[in-house]
Amino acid sequence: MFDNLSVKLERAFKTLKGQGSITEVNVATTVKEIRKALIDADVNYKVAKEVTDTIRQKALGQQVLVSVSPGQLLTKIVDEELTSLMGGEKVDIDIKGDPAVILISGLQGSGKTTFSGKLANMLKKQNRQVLLTACDVYRPAAIEQLKVLGEQIDVEVYAETDHRDPLKIAKNALAHAKAHNKKIVIVDTAGRLAVDEEMMQEITLLKEHLNPSETLFVVDSMTGQDAVNTAKTFNERLNFDGVVLTKLDGDTRGGAALSIKTVVNKPIKFISTGEKMEAIDIFHPDRMARRILGMGDVVSLVEKAQQTFDEEEAKRLNKKIRKNQFNFNDFLSQLEQIKKMGNIKDLVGMLPGMNKALKGIDIDDDSFRPIEAIIKSMTVKERENPDLINGSRRKRIANGSGTSIQQVNNLLKQFGDMRKLMKTMNKMGGGKRGLANLN
Ligand code: GDP
């Protein structure tokens, strides 16, 4: 996400390298590059112009500062402006009422149903009682899809299939929620391929009668400026409370994320970066700006790890590490947990400097497949005690896992190195501090 913009902004800052101070001339050159980078990222032209005008004014206004380099100063200003462009502060959703209603709107295929499941999953993890409601009555597959998601995340789904009156279904769902002690009702609604009057009437009717404390508009970020225009049209009719940007994992430009707040004047509240139920994040404009500038987003990474990782499992692993008993079974269990955290490339991209390093490199869940295959081809004894794995066993494991002896050797070596490192850290007394924090 935002790969190209990050690279181009870095190039823009490079034009200031070696320059002792900010001047009209060097700022003009850099700002021109920044504007070009934003427009290439599909940011609305007017927005790009406004932002870069502000950046220029701020940079020239701070001419007196001599202790920071012009490059650092510009980076700081761009960081502030990108943050403000995306809304400044994060804005939480409003959950009020008994039950509280969250209405989900958007075009067909934007990711409404998937997002409804993700939001339910997120709220459930906060120990809230959630009911999902299937009001996409025109696509029978949509009801089925929500039911499957509900089962997956263990959240009840309310649906009626004998008629096509979404308002009636939603009202019955609210009554069902009250009767069954559900505190939040998420209403997934029908979309169309493009904005049409019938859909608008239906969704506005639902909003009027259900009195939701939060109405979210879901939009596919890959559609760039179209996403911004659709948001504008929906907002004019629906006056929604917040935007959910989906498919950011496939969006290398980021124009929608950067323009929507300014054009529509509604905050982005969530972003979605994959098809898995865990691939959802609360949107923090400041963290996103830092990611765009290649400064990483370690805070989000740690939060994600805390949400996904099983605490008991982490404690168990820590104990094994301290006793120097970490084996291939534990390694496999860690891989499983990392995979649950969502899109791998996106996760690694949260580390400072990694976005650029990963540009053009394809890493996904499949990258783990040979490793998993190799471990799964080991016997229980071998996994527990990798020292047993001699030449002939390596050959057997390579055959069994469909990999090469070289791949098996590599994994064994990496695992050996990792164990050595753990041993050293334990000796230094860092096992508790250092590795405990990683798990
Ligand atoms: P709806 O018609 O608005 O309910 O859209 P769906 O929830 O059915 O999503 C349409 C398609 O987009 C499905 O194949 C989803 O798996 C996929 N999808 C949804 N969100 C994301 C996302 O954040 N990233 C990716 N890559 N795919 C997504």
Image (tube, rainbow, N blue to C red):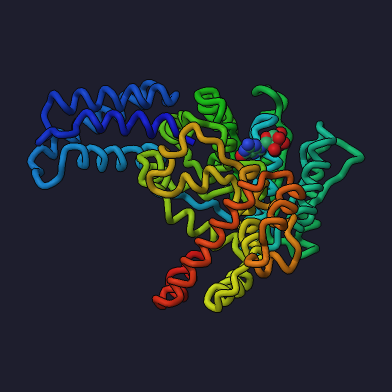
The answer to which image quadrant residue 427 occupies is bottom left
In this view of the protein, which residue sits in the foreground, 100 or 274?
A: 274
Q: Identify the residue at image location x=19%, y=36%.
A: 58
Question: In the orientation shown, which residue stands out farthest toward the front?
Answer: 391
The quadrant where residue 24 appears: top left
Instruction: Pick the residue in front: 196 or 344.
Output: 344
Q: Position of residue 188 (x, y in %)?
A: 71, 42
Residue 295 x, y percent position in the rendering? 36, 46
- Along the line of sight, which residue is nearer the eye, 429 or 96? 429
| Residue drawn at (67%, 66%) of the image | 388
> Which quadrant of the render holds ligand 1?
top right
Mark yes or no: residue 105 visible: no
In the image, 150: left or right of 260? Answer: right
Residue 272 as seen in the image, left or right of residue 381: left
Q: How many marks?
A: 0
Front in this rendered view, residue 430 or 27:
430
Residue depicted at x 64% and y 33% = 110
Examine the rendered structure and indicate whether residue 314 appears above or below residue 392: below
Residue 304 placement (x, y as % from top left): 53, 56
Above/below status of 37 relative to 302: above
Relative vertical location of residue 341 with respect to residue 216 in this rendering, above or below? below
Position of 164 with respect to 186 (left or right) is right
Residue 46 vs 103, above or below: the answer is above
At a point 54% along the width and 51% down the height, the residue shown is: 93
Q: Position of residue 90 (x, y in %)?
A: 44, 49
Regarding residue 415, the answer to whether it shows in the image is: yes
